[in-house]
Structure formats: structure tokens, C-alpha cells
Amino acid sequence: MKLKLFALLLTSLFPLASQAADPQVERYIVTFPQGDHVEYQGAYATNFPDGLPVGVGSGLQFMGKEGDKLFFATVTDRGPNADSPKVGDKESKIFANPKYTPLLMTIRVADGKALATDAHALHDENGPISGLPLPEGLIGATNEIALSDTLQPLSSDKRGLDTEGITPDGKGGYWLCDEYGPFIINIDGKGKILKKYGPQAEQGEQGVAGGLPNILKWRQANRGFEGITRMPDGRIIAAVQSTLDIDGKSKNSAQFTRLVSFNPETGQTVMYGYPIDVDVYKKAKDAKIGDIVALDDNRLLVIEQGGDKNKVMRNLVYVVDLSQASDLSTFDKEKAPEFDDAAQLTARGIKLAEKKQVVDLRKLGWQQEKAEGMTLIDNQTIAVINDNDFGLQSVVDKSDATKVSIKPLEKPESQNELWVIKLSDALK
């Protein structure tokens, strides 16, 4: 009895002794050298007297330290764009600067500041690429219409990319991933495209790149690869942002989204199912992957986010274990597992990856809609960043839904926030 009373006394005196400390967060707003901006001389240029802010943060990769300085590689997406009305039965997007080229940049954190510098335009042997959508009829085309800010049609681009993730290739360059194709792209340290892989075209199809499973062509439009990482053994893992929509029938009910393993030395691919928190969302398609980071040859960190049934945003980081997960490609020939519910997956012997929550960014004060870049600094520290969408948004005329204007985003959405988070426990 005395021992029990002593234990109760200790608990009352030190109620927090057995609880882990909260994660520690260093918060930065990414800035650019004076004059850095995206040129915009369109119809609404008076709303942007200094041009558009640069929109880094679609991907993030820790590159190392020099004393107290931290260095990260980052990449922009396809460029400043905004929602616009449908053209007939097709979706459309306004491209405020159609000549924009996605950029590879460096972020240096030092003296309490995060500065983005050293921009390299992504390019191939034909020169700088664009972020414009692919022509209709090709694998990777989103079939959306590109429009100017006055809603005039723009040309599509067979070389267009919507880059969304970055990881080192171990040779001084990087692997990027893309939402269009979806594509996996190898670039050198100056942004030159060396190789590109995409869904392998089958009979009667046309593609601009191959080498990846054909089923990936069923990614939802603008929901292709959102995160990429290189495992210690050299395999590349790319994450499809949301559920596949096979034959236009599976996006709302699929239990998982796909993680694609690609061996650049052999070309071998394996596909795993990442189990989304399906019961939290109104529809399964509402779940989105933000980024992924390798911990070892079997485990990843994954950002899962999206609006829940009450339209409340959630941004969660999970440790995901692939060691017992099934290769989905062995089951695709019979019936794509996206059409199975949880019980049917079990009955077929399909095992999805296992996951465990590490941190809830919202509970730490994260206010941005999405965290689109994540990287590992050490076994207890991660960094996350948002994409500020180049600081613009479209506004629909309330009296005429076919009329759209462009105006600046308000803070904090217009800013690139970089958080360095020391977790409560080491990632073992």
C-alpha cells in the first residue's frame, strides 16, 4: 500500500514526467534576392506591380550543413496557374505566364533566414521546357485546356512537365517526379533532363516516355506523382498523389494510393498500396499525398493530407513500412485492387503497407492548406515546406461565371513557409 501511495504521490508531483516532450519547430518564410520574381504583364498586371512571387516548395531535399547553415534543394511546379471555367466539357486552367519554365533552386537557412537562390531552368537538348499540359491523345495528357488570362486558348506542349518532388540520384544530379504523365525524370545538377520515364504505351496508345506500369495512366488529372525518394539501395519510390481512377470508376472508393518502386539500373518496377485514412474523407479521392522520404530500404515518411468529411484540413506525417506489403502488379492482371473493399483485399491475400502516425502538423500550428515538400535532416529532425502557388488566384464574376480575373493570394497562403521540426522521438 505504501508503494502505491508513493507512486500516486510521484504522479501528482510530476504529471508530465512520463510524457514525451512536444516537437520543437523553427519557422521560416522563404525569401528571394531583391528583384527575383516571375514576370507577369497580362491583363491584371496592375494587381501585381512587382510581378508574381516565385513558387518554390513543390519538393524539398536536405543537402547538408556548413556550420550552422542548412542547405536544401527545391523545385517549382509548372508555374503560375489558376482555375478557370470549363471549355465545353473539358476542364481548363489559366496560365498567367505561358513561357514559364520550372526551376531547380537552393534554399539556404542561416542567421534566422531562409533564402532561395541559384535558379536553374529545367531544360533538354531543345532548350528550356514549359509547364504547359501535354497534347490530347498522349499518355500523360490531362485533357485540360490551357488558357491565357483573357481566356484565349494556348498551345499544349509535348515536353511540358508539372514537377512535384525531388531526391538525389547519387551522381550529383536529381530524380524529379511529375503530375502529368505521371513521369519520373533524371536531371543533372544544372537542371538538364537526362532521362524520363512514364506509363508504357500499349497497342493503340501514344506516349512520350515509357518504362513504368501502364496502369499509372489512370491517375486523376493533376494527381500524378506528388512525392519521390531514393532508397539507400538505389531504388526510386514515387507516390501517386491520390487514388487511381481506373476507367473513371475507382477514385471515390479505392482503399489506397500507389507507391511505385523503380530500379533505374534494371528497370524493374514494383507497386505497393499506401492505405489512406479512407473513413475520414467524404470520398477516397479527397486524400492526397504531400511528399515521401526514405528512412531505410523498407520504411518511408509520408505526408497524408486533405479535407475531411467536415472540410477541415488535415496534414499528418506517417512512418510507412513496405516490408510486408504485396506487389500490386501481380494482382492487376486479374482485377485492379482499386475495385476491392477492405474485406475483398484480405480475401485476395493483398496486404497494404503498414503505417504509424509521427506528427500532426496542424497541432503544431501549420495553417497552410498543403505541405508539399518534406525531407529528413537527421533521425529526429524533418523539414516541411508549402507551395505558395506563385501568390495568385482566380476570382469568378458572381454575375457571370464565364468571366474570371486574377488577384493576389492573401497571407499566409502567398508565402513559402519552411519548418524545421525536431520530433519528440528519434525515427528508429
Image (cartoon, grey):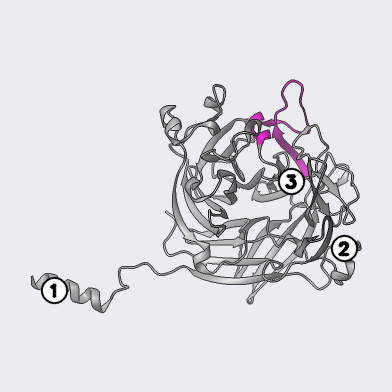
Seen from the viewer's position, the closer of residues 242 and 50 is 242
Occupied quadrant, residue 392: bottom right
> What residue is pinned by disc 1?
5
Asked if residue 36 can be seen in this view, the reply is yes
Where residue 341 appears, x then y in whole percent? 47, 35
Whether the magenta-drawn stretch holds residue 196 is answered as yes
From mark 1 to mark 3, how far is it between C-alphas?
Answer: 65 Å
Whichever of labels 1 and 2 marks the residue nearer the N terminus, that label is 1
Q: Which circle marks residue 187 in the picture?
A: 3
Where residue 240 appears, x then y in whole percent? 61, 42
Residue ranking furthest to the front: 399
Residue at 57% in and 55% down: 307
Whichever of labels 2 and 3 marks the residue nearer the N terminus, that label is 2
Residue at 59% in and 48% down: 286
Q: Secondary structure at mark 3?
A: strand
Residue at 57% in and 62% down: 383
> What residue is pinned by disc 2?
39
Instruction: Work out which quarter of the rendered image holds the N terminus and state it.
Output: bottom left
Residue at 45% in and 54% down: 357
Amino acid of disc 3: Ile
Amino acid of disc 1: Leu
Q: Nearer the viewer, mark 2 or mark 3?
A: 2
Where residue 115 appears, x then y in whole percent? 71, 69
From mark 2 to mark 3, how far is it between C-alphas?
Answer: 25 Å
Whether the magenta-drawn stretch holds residue 393 is answered as no
